[in-house]
Amino acid sequence: MGDVWGELRRPGFLRSATPWRAAGYLLVSGAAGVLLCAGLLVAAVAAGVLAVVLVGLPLLAGLALVGVPFAAWERRLVRLLDGTRVADPHQLPSRPGLSAWLRLRYREQATWRELGFTVLAAFVLWPVDLVVVGCALVVPAYLLAALPLLLADGEQVNVLKLWEVHSPAVAGAFGIVGLVALTLFAYPLTAVAAGRAALVRLVLSPGGQELRIGELVSSRARLVDAFEAERRRIERDLHDGAQQRLVALSMTLGLARLDAPPDSALAAQLAVAHREAGEALSELRELINGIHPQVLTDRGLPDACADAADRSPIRVEVRFDLPGRLPSAVESAGYFAVSEALANVAKHSGAGTARIDGHYADGLLTIDVSDDGGGGADPAGGTGLTGLADRVSVVDGTLTVSSPPGGPTLLRVEIPCTPLSPTRSG
């Protein structure tokens, strides 16, 4: 299978399967068009009658989406002709659920192109499809059957309901004409099928803007995955390399202090070096934890946020209600949003307590970080909120802050996602 227009110009075209595929394509598309036409007429009449009592309005709104499944069928049907795939122009909803799917479909240009093509197929294309198939196959078949029918009847045969034939010789001549017609009609039949397939590709495949959107979404997803993989690699290298060396250095300095003469200058210098090594090790552990904490990888977002709360200088209450583990990029964005929010609370709010609430509903992860501080948080004030919003937006999330002067402050992160497992965690 390949380019149908190229097949038409090849010497072996009549011996190939292309004419028969073209006939099958037009026959199936024509039959589908008949059913579609009948269904649309019935649905439109029913919606118009019921619209008087407002019941038909949802049906009318639903008719606008009839092109979505029919266009999907047409894109698959094209493969019957030449084996090539027509890409789906639709985007995936940012969150699961019927409401998100409907909102996206009504906003997409592809939906309205598909509706226009569906109307065209229902009232214009199917008669053309069936007429072409009828002329290319049915008429030659009648001519070819003239001689067998005459021999079976023994007296006469009506060819195409136009000619009465009594002579086997004349009936045989009609059969020869039918064979020639079948051969000649293969070319226009295939050309019409190729033109119809080209129309499907023109109208129902992604446009330039849709292709660019799809490429941007795919590129961003690849960048997020690559960034997460690189961050984990750095965390692993620091944990297994530099941290282990610092631990060994700290132990060696501790042993050297035991061997040094007490109250000597050497003992004092070793004590300073031992303390510096310990501080460097603590800073490295904090750095590793900031890159990607191991608890986030091993146990998920609730435990990682609880660990961040335990390290906060103020009292923090943590409560999560999640249906299971979430995608790693979502967990990472949620964790660092919480960590940055807790850092802001400790540094700028003057709060005594804070609270972290996380839950998942209708395809949306929501995390609220609130405190009883003085409020007045300003993204332009250098508190890291702008960078935090950028980090969350990478995973299609949003960040909102409510922080009136005098408090309290509420930071909310919302990220659309789908759980990876059904295990409860809280």
Image (cartoon, rainbow, N blue to C red):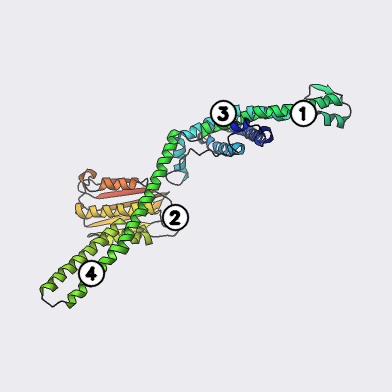
Residue at image mark 3:
120
State whether residue 234 is above or below residue 80: below
Residue at image mark 4:
250
- Residue 168 appears anywhere in the view: yes
Q: Residue at x 44, y 55 (%)?
A: 420
- Distance from disc 3 to disc 1, alpha carbons, whole Å, reads 31 Å
Q: Quadrant of the C terminus?
A: bottom left
Dot 3 crowding, Cα within 10 Å, few <14, some 14–19, many 20+: some
Image disc number at residue 420? 2
Dot 4 crowding, Cα within 10 Å, few <14, some 14–19, many 20+: many
- Look at the numbered disc 3 and give the secondary structure of its residue: helix
Three-letter code for the amino acid on which mark 1 is drawn: Tyr
Image disc number at residue 142? 1
Dot 1 crowding, Cα within 10 Å, few <14, some 14–19, many 20+: some
Q: Position of residue 354 (x, y in %)?
A: 26, 56
Tag 3 or tag 2, which sits nearer the N-term?
3
- Distance from disc 1 to disc 4, alpha carbons, whole Å, reads 98 Å
Q: Is residue 384 left or right of residue 198?
A: left
- Whether label 2 touches label 3, CB < 8 Å: no
- Whether label 2 touches label 1, CB < 8 Å: no
Q: Residue at x 55, y 32 (%)?
A: 200
Q: Nearer the viewer, mark 3 or mark 1?
A: 1
Q: Nearer the viewer, mark 3 or mark 4?
A: 4
- Look at the numbered disc 1 and give the secondary structure of its residue: helix
- Distance from disc 3 to disc 4, alpha carbons, whole Å, reads 79 Å
Three-letter code for the amino acid on which mark 3 is drawn: Leu
Tag 1 or tag 3, which sits nearer the N-term?
3
- Distance from disc 2 to disc 1, alpha carbons, whole Å, reads 61 Å
